[in-house]
């Protein structure tokens, strides 16, 4: 892990939580939408949020995980 200040860790933790929630919501919407093209779009959005989640998590811990 890099040497982050406490403020850096606070910001990264907040971003991690936001990206995780955005991914979770986008996945939920992709499963509930009846329009297939919109559902696929939301699935793509969820994947983008998951990539950002993993990047932030890797910055903090060096570990890759799913965003839930």
Image (cartoon, rainbow, N blue to C red):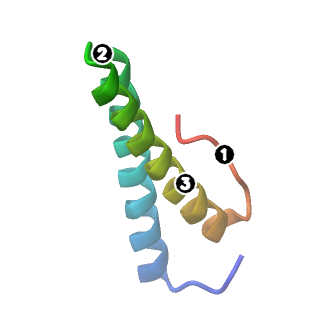
| Crowdedness near tag 1: few (<14), some (14–19) or many (≥20) residues, C-alpha within 10 Å | few
Determine whether the residue tagged by mark 1 lies in a helix, strand or loop.
loop
The correct choice, above or below, for 46 with respect to 51 in the image is above
The correct choice, above or below, for 1 with respect to 49 in the image is below
- Which mark, by number, is residue 29? none
**Earlier sequence position, callout 2 versus callout 1:** 2
Q: Alpha-carbon distance for marks 2 and 1?
A: 24 Å
Residue 56 placement (x, y as % from top left):
55, 64
Q: Nearer the viewer, residue 3 or 36?
A: 36
Residue 6 placement (x, y as % from top left):
47, 80
The residue located at (26%, 13%) in the rendering is 34
Determine whether the residue tagged by mark 3 lies in a helix, strand or loop.
helix
To which residue does mark 1 refer?
Answer: 65
To which residue does mark 3 refer?
Answer: 51
**Earlier sequence position, callout 2 versus callout 3:** 2
Based on the displayed image, in which of its 4 quarters is residue 33 positioned? top left
């Amino acid at each position: 892990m890099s040497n982050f200040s406490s403020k850096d860790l606070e910001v990264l933790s907040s971003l991690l939580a936001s990206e995780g929630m955005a991914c979770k919501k986008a996945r939920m919407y992709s499963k509930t939408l009846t329009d297939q093209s919109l559902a696929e779009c939301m699935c793509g959005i969820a994947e983008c949020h998951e990539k950002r989640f993993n990047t932030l998590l890797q910055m903090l811990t060096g570990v890759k995980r799913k965003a839930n």
